[in-house]
């Protein structure tokens, strides 16, 4: 019991919450920290497969159909995600995937696809609700549908960011102390009944 109290006090003074930020840029993409699959190209500049985000001369992900960016190294609970979304239009859609591939959240594009317009390019951010956090996080699914008038589906993505956290040491200390008190209380109650 004495050791549990000492451990709980040590955790209590251990420090603030641990937060991790994972960012995937496509500058020198090597498959880590997120694994890509599906229809995509990593490119610079603009062509029939995608249009560079305004002011961006670095490589970016251009989805040509459906692509997945999956993570297997996120520690803790995901609190929010963000990414640079270029040429946002009604034919784009993305999904946040949870454990087992379940859809946690999805968003259709709303712009007109003008890669020069600030309204159609920018950083998209989603903060997870408590219910969404329970579904976990495994990655993104990006979809670009052919509009039949353009002939080339594309959804441009860069700087995919995942912010997660692990419980504060003080939270762990309270939990351990609570279990210790429950154990002590049930043990004391058994002794009182036996006497």
Image: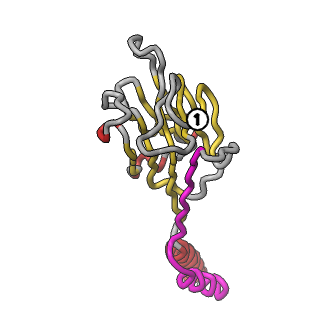
Residue tagged by mark 1? 43
- Residue 185 seen in the current view: no
Q: Position of residue 18 (x, y in %)?
A: 54, 69
Quadrant of the drawing holding the N terminus:
bottom right
Q: Which residues are magenta?
A: 1-26
Q: Is residue 158 above or below residue 109?
A: below
Q: Mark 1 packing: few (<14 Cα in 10 Å), some, or many (20+)?
A: many
Q: Position of residue 21 (x, y in %)?
A: 54, 59
Which residue reaches farthest right?
30
Quadrant of the drawing holding the C terminus:
bottom right
Residue shown at 70%/44% (left/top)? Answer: 30
Question: Does the magenta-highlighted stretch encompass residue 8?
Answer: yes
**Quadrant assignment, res 34:** top right
**Quadrant assignment, res 68:** top right
Which residue reaches farthest top?
148
- Comparing 38 with 115, the one in front is 115
Secondary structure of the residue carrying tag 1 is strand
Residue shown at 44%/44% (left/top)? Answer: 84
How many labels were placed on the picture?
1
Question: Does the magenta-highlighted stretch encompass residue 128?
Answer: no
Residue shown at 31%/27% (left/top)? Answer: 112
Colouring method of the image = secondary structure
Q: Is residue 69 above or below residue 161?
A: above
> Left or right: where does residue 148 sit relative to residue 164?
left
Residue shown at 51%/51% (left/top)? Answer: 161
Q: Position of residue 151 (x, y in %)?
A: 46, 14
Q: Position of residue 170 (x, y in %)?
A: 51, 77
> Left or right: where does residue 13 sit relative to residue 30?
left
- Comparing 83 with 11, the one in front is 83
- Comparing 191 with 154, the one in front is 154
- Residue 86 seen in the current view: yes
């Amino acid at each position: 019991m004495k050791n549990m109290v000492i451990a709980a006090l040590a955790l209590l003074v251990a420090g603030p919450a641990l937060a991790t930020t994972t960012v995937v840029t496509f500058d020198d993409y090597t498959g880590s920290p997120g694994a890509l699959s599906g229809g995509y190209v990593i490119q610079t500049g603009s062509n029939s497969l995608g249009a560079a985000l305004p002011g961006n001369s670095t490589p970016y992900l251009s989805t040509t159909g459906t692509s997945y960016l999956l993570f297997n190294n996120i520690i803790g609970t995901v609190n929010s995600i963000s990414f640079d979304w270029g040429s946002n239009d009604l034919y784009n859609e993305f999904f946040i995937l949870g454990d087992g591939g379940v859809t946690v959240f999805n968003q259709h594009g709303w712009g007109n696809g003008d890669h020069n317009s600030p309204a159609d390019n920018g950083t998209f951010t989603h903060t997870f609700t408590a219910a969404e956090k329970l579904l976990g996080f495994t990655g993104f699914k990006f979809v670009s549908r052919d509009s039949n008038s353009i002939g080339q589906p594309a959804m441009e993505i860069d700087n995919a960011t995942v912010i997660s956290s692990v419980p504060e040491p003080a939270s762990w200390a309270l939990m351990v102390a609570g279990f210790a008190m429950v154990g002590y209380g049930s043990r004391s109650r058994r002794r009182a009944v036996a006497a």
